[in-house]
Image (tube, helix red, strand yellow):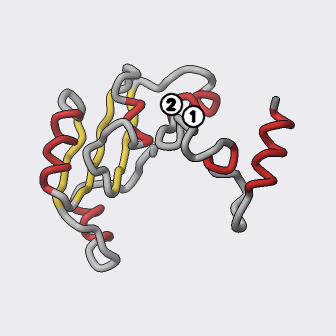
Amino acid sequence: LHLRVGGHARARRSGQRVYPQCTEVCAPNSCTQKHSMDLPWVLRPLWGGAMPDQLSILNIGCRDFGPDDPLSGFLGAGVALHGLCVEKDASMLARARRRLEGHEVQTLEVALTPHNAQQLLRNHKMAQVDI
């Protein structure tokens, strides 16, 4: 199966990426997983097979922290999140706040730029983050 999928991806490959995009592995109209990523599953081997009790996160452009956000998989995984969620769209950030209830994640409505990034991270004590 892996050889068949890999061959199909090579045949559809475009650009210089190392890994194939979902649409290069399957047809775009039949690819059901193109907007999802199970980050807890991907990172579990780095943690010795067990999820950590808590994670410090920095999510720049968190939008609504919905299912298409790679970090959203931690919401239902029994991990206590703390850190910072930055989003410039107030309505999206309001949804993110609701999804992050029960976690110690600060939400900040601002557009992050090269001119304000360093001060913003200092002000919110984001010197060390897990993800």
Q: Observer-nearest residue: 91 or 77?
A: 91
The residue wearing badge 2 is 40
- Position of residue 57 measured from the top left corner of the image (x, y, whole percent): 37, 44
Quadrant containing the N terminus in the rendered view? top right
Q: Which mark is residue 43?
A: 1
Quadrant containing the C terminus in the rendered view? top left
**How far, Cα to Cα, is label 2 from label 1?**
5 Å
106 with respect to 22 (left or right): left
Pointer 2 with pointer 1, Cβ within 8 A: yes
* Amino acid of disc 2: Pro
Residue shown at the point (69%, 61%) measured from the top left:
17
Residue shown at the point (48%, 38%) measured from the top left:
36
Q: Observer-nearest residue: 4 or 41?
A: 4
Q: Quadrant of residue 12?
A: bottom right
* Amino acid of disc 1: Leu
- Position of residue 87 measured from the top left corner of the image (x, y, whole percent): 24, 57
Compared to 8, does 45 lie above or below?
Answer: above
Q: Which mark is residue 15?
A: none
Compared to 50, does 129 lie above or below?
Answer: below
Indicate the secondary structure of the residue bearing disc 2: helix
53 with respect to 94 (left or right): right
